[in-house]
């Protein structure tokens, strides 16, 4: 099953920028997924098992880093990249 995972990370203390960057570096090195990052969130596309493994493997070191961060995620059971969004509905 193809999925879309949206991840947003929030700082809870100083020093969070490097923890977020490290997370994104790890995530972007994962195979069998597509990653798009913008100023607000990161979207991950692919098969459910590959996406969830990439998320878990990339997030755990950030959570263990000692820097307080919050990671909020949403998952959609469809491959919904930004080029498929129908923005005409937003007017």
Image (cartoon, rainbow, N blue to C red):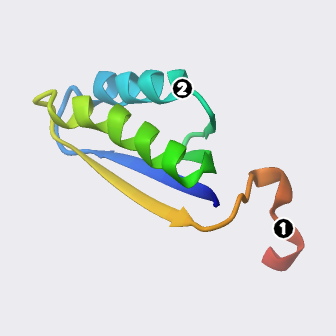
Image quarter where the C terminus lies is bottom right
**Residue beneath the point at 54% across and 26% down:** 28
Q: Residue at point 21% right, 26% down?
A: 15
Q: Is residue 24 left or right of residue 77?
A: left
Give the residue number, with chain letter if any, for mark 1: 87
The answer to which of marks 1 and 2 sits earlier in the sequence is: 2
Q: Nearer the viewer, mark 1 or mark 2?
A: 2
Q: Residues within 10 Å of mark 2 (few under 14, many from 20)?
A: some
Q: Position of residue 67 (x, y in %)?
A: 15, 32
Q: Give the x, y percent position of residue 20.
A: 36, 31
Helix, strand, or loop for circle 2?
helix
* Residue 59, quarter of the rendered image: top left
Q: Residue at x 71, y 58 (%)?
A: 79
Furthest residue in direction right, as rendered: 88
Rendered image quadrant of residue 62: top left
The answer to whether any part of residue 41 appears in the image is no
Q: Can residue 25 be seen from the camera position used here? A: yes
User: Which disc, if any, is residue 17?
Assistant: none
- Please state which of residues 47 and 19 is positioned toward the viewer in this rendering: 47
Q: Is residue 50 toward the left or the right of residue 58 in the image?
A: right
Badge 2 is on which residue? 28
């Amino acid at each position: 099953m193809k999925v879309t995972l949206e991840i947003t990370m929030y700082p809870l203390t100083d020093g969070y920028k490097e923890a977020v960057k490290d997370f994104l570096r790890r995530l972007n090195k994962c195979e069998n997924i597509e990653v798009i990052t913008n100023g607000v969130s990161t979207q991950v596309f692919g098969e459910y098992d590959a996406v969830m493994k990439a998320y878990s493997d990339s997030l755990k070191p950030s959570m263990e880093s000692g820097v307080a961060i919050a990671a909020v995620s949403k998952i959609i059971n469809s491959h919904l990249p930004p080029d498929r969004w129908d923005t005409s509905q937003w007017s």
